[in-house]
Amino acid sequence: MDPHLPPLSTEQLPSSAQMGERDPKPDPQATPDLSRVLLPLGLAVLAVSAAGINALVITAILVTRRLRSPANYLICSLALTDLLVAVLVMPVGIVYISEERWALGTALCHLWLGTDVTCCTCSILHLAAIAIDRYRAITDAVAYSQKRTARHALLTISAVWLLSVLVSLPPLVWRRQDGESETGGTVMQCLMEHDHVAFTVYSTLGAFYIPLLLILVLYFRIYHAAQTLRSRHGSRLVRCGAVSSVVLPGEGSRSGSGWEQVGTLSPSTLSPVTLSPTERSFSDVSNEGDRTHITGTTSAPPLRPRHTPAARERRAALTLGLILGAFVVCWLPFFLKEVIVNSCPSCGASAAMADGLTWLGYLNSLINPLIYTAFNQDFKKAFKRLLALHCNRYR
């Protein structure tokens, strides 16, 4: 993708992220035939994989009641955005790379650019929205649990899409206002040109650098808040002799259709998780014990030892590292290139480098659903059921 950058020239229409110009009449012998086949094939595998895993996440949330919680609605919207990137943006990019020229017409070039810029920006802003949701859930668990409704989630999703359009729309409108002429009625290139440094700063800040700063600050504060809560409640659990067998007090908060772990640093804290009956908070289990004593009935099976706090901390650190690492590795090189190329008149990037950085950003659409569901047992179970059902149909 070529996030949001300015007007097209009269001879070159913008394309998703490519600064280097392509030879409109490439030499068929310039590139080995094998590489010209393997590269599009590899990119096609990436696109199909991204579409498949995101579609699986969306389906799991829609058909599994336990996963239909406000926190997971953000995950569903993120998966939908990444699915659009995989289905609408990547295939056209594959054709463009394999043909080494734009052969799909002016109208489709404009449409592809708009979809590319908007969806990729929206995917990045979803990651920031999820970080805000996680931060509020752990630092203001009681009050936020009352606000964390389906309506609140839908308003958040709408705000993310609106902001994405506001960040992405100016280059498209600006391009139309410039008035374009075509040579011979055909467009050989579909490139986004950057003639205004101010616009480059605006678009890259809105699409990446501000969300990146927000994500880094929020996850640091999540980690700090979780450590504070753990030290505050740890001694109480030690006195109860239950440090290794239950979740810390204050972790359970009713949200949506299940319990969500919001008061401790764990993989659950960093990616939405619905807790099973054996993972509820110590205070909730104690209350159930009181009700059992009064009514003479048992409302839940006895707790079994869970992971130790140290093990949860290590897994949580791994999750946080994956979330931040994948986001930075996939998108930072592309946006650094955008700033450097557009602020330095003598600097440039080859078409091969531009393509590589663009597709590194697209790779994030495959990684996102893997990271945000990998530590969620409910998602894993839903995936297994869906895949088993699919396999049984074709036996």
Image (cartoon, helix red, strand yellow):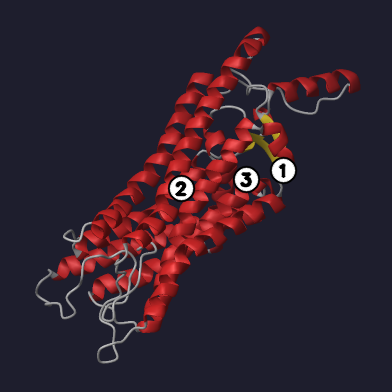
Where is 45 relative to 104, above or below?
above
What residue did someone put label 2 on? 211
Residue type, mark 3 in image: Ala
The label on residue 71 is 3
Secondary structure under tag 3 reads: helix
Where residue 164 sits: x, y (%)?
50, 60
Where residue 71 sits: x, y (%)?
62, 45
In screen coordinates, is 385 left or right of 85? right
Q: CA distance from mark 2 to mark 3?
A: 19 Å
Mark 1 or mark 2: name the one nearer the start of the chain. 1
Residue ID at (33%, 70%) = 15
Residue at the extreme top: 239
Badge 3: how crowded within 10 Å, few (<14), some, or many (20+)? many
In screen coordinates, is 155 left or right of 271? right
Q: CA distance from mark 3 to mark 1?
A: 12 Å
Residue 138 lies in what quarter of the image?
A: top right
Residue type, mark 1 in image: Lys
Q: Are marks 1 and 2 in contact (CB under 8 Å)?
A: no
Residue type, mark 2 in image: Pro
Residue ID at (54%, 28%) = 265
Badge 1: how crowded within 10 Å, few (<14), some, or many (20+)? few
Mark 2 or mark 3: name the one nearer the start of the chain. 3
The nearer-to-camera label among 3 and 1 is 1
Secondary structure under tag 1 reads: helix
Figure quadrant of the N terminus: bottom left
The nearer-to-camera label among 2 and 3 is 2
Where is 296 relative to 326, above or below?
above
The nearer-to-camera label among 1 and 2 is 2
What residue did someone put label 1 on? 147
Residue at the extreme left: 29
